Image: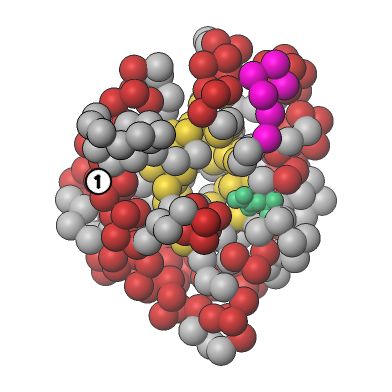
Amino acid sequence: MRKPLIAANWKMYKIPAEATAFIGAFLPLVASQEKTEIVLCPSMTSLAVSLEATKGTQVHIGAQTMDWHDNGAFTGETSPVMLNAIDVTHVLIGHSERRQYFNETDETVNHKLKAALAHKLVPIVCVGEHKADRESGRTNDVLKKQLTVGLQGIDPAAAAPLVIAYEPVWAIGTGLTATPQIAEDAHKFIRAQIAEILSPAIAASTRILYGGSVKPDNAASLCCLENIDGALVGGASLDPTSFAQLIANSSI
Ligand code: PEP
């Protein structure tokens, strides 16, 4: 059984006071939500207050990125050791905005994934094709490369926490959503790749999230498919009522 996971990617929004206010409003709305693992990924400066505000609840806090070194002369970076020290439990790796604006590659994704697993963080590894890839029929080639390089050298025995987020780049923040069929086909392909690269057992237990303009009104049609185990949500996670509604709708 794969427990559904819904993660909020707040990107570069919400100062600490706004994160605290969100969580204050959000917690009562999801108090009875036990079927779904809920993760909020605030900006680095809002991690501490978010951890404090969710202490003792079922809501987890994740980082939006991290470096793969434990420490060192890497100005501006945050290490897995630092995330561990404040009790962050999850981390997004290789989000398409990180790949587009901060030069992240499949190779850096691989380093980060190994570091996250070594430090017992739940890695949410983002993959997905651009519009031009889909239009030229290259979607599966792109996904295969992202996974082959991204998961290279991962010990299947240590890979159980792995989560993949399939996020077609053309659907992120655009209001365009993959049809349930497009999403399910991509998720099925990703699961088959994980079986080849890691093992069939890991493939069967790995949660694969869909991301790309998920909203309260389309969550049910996407999250109920055989190979879709939840969602990574940007825009619709910024408002507590909307995000709680999305979670409720996804678990109908
Ligand atoms: C995201 O940031 O990962 C994302 C999917 O954004 P949105 O839901 O706004 O498309």
- Eyeballing the image, is 224 above or below 22? below
- Eyeballing the image, is 153 above or below 120? below
Which quadrant of the figure contains the N terminus?
A: top left
Q: Residues within 10 Å of mark 1 (few under 14, many from 20)?
A: many
In percent of width and height, residue 46 lies at 58, 23
Residue at the location (61% across, 41% down)?
A: 11
Q: Nearer the viewer, residue 201 or 123?
A: 123
Element class at badge 1: helix
- Eyeballing the image, is 181 above or below 246? below
In percent of width and height, residue 122 lies at 38, 37
Residue at the bottom extreme, as displayed: 136
Which quadrant of the figure contains the C terminus?
A: top right
Q: Is residue 16 magenta?
A: yes
Residue 23 seen = no
In percent of width and height, residue 227 lies at 52, 60
Residue at the location (70% across, 69% down)?
A: 179
Residue at the location (77% across, 55% down)?
A: 218
Provide the residue designation for mark 1. Answer: 114
Q: Is residue 27 magenta?
A: no
Residue at the location (52% across, 56% down)?
A: 101
Residue 152 seen = yes
Left or right of 164? Residue 73 is: left
Beta carbon at label 1 within 8 Å of ligand 1: no
In percent of width and height, residue 193 lies at 34, 69
Identify the magenta region. 13-18
Q: Nearer the viewer, residue 81 or 78?
A: 78
Left or right of 103? Residue 128 is: right
Q: Amino acid at mark 1?
A: Lys
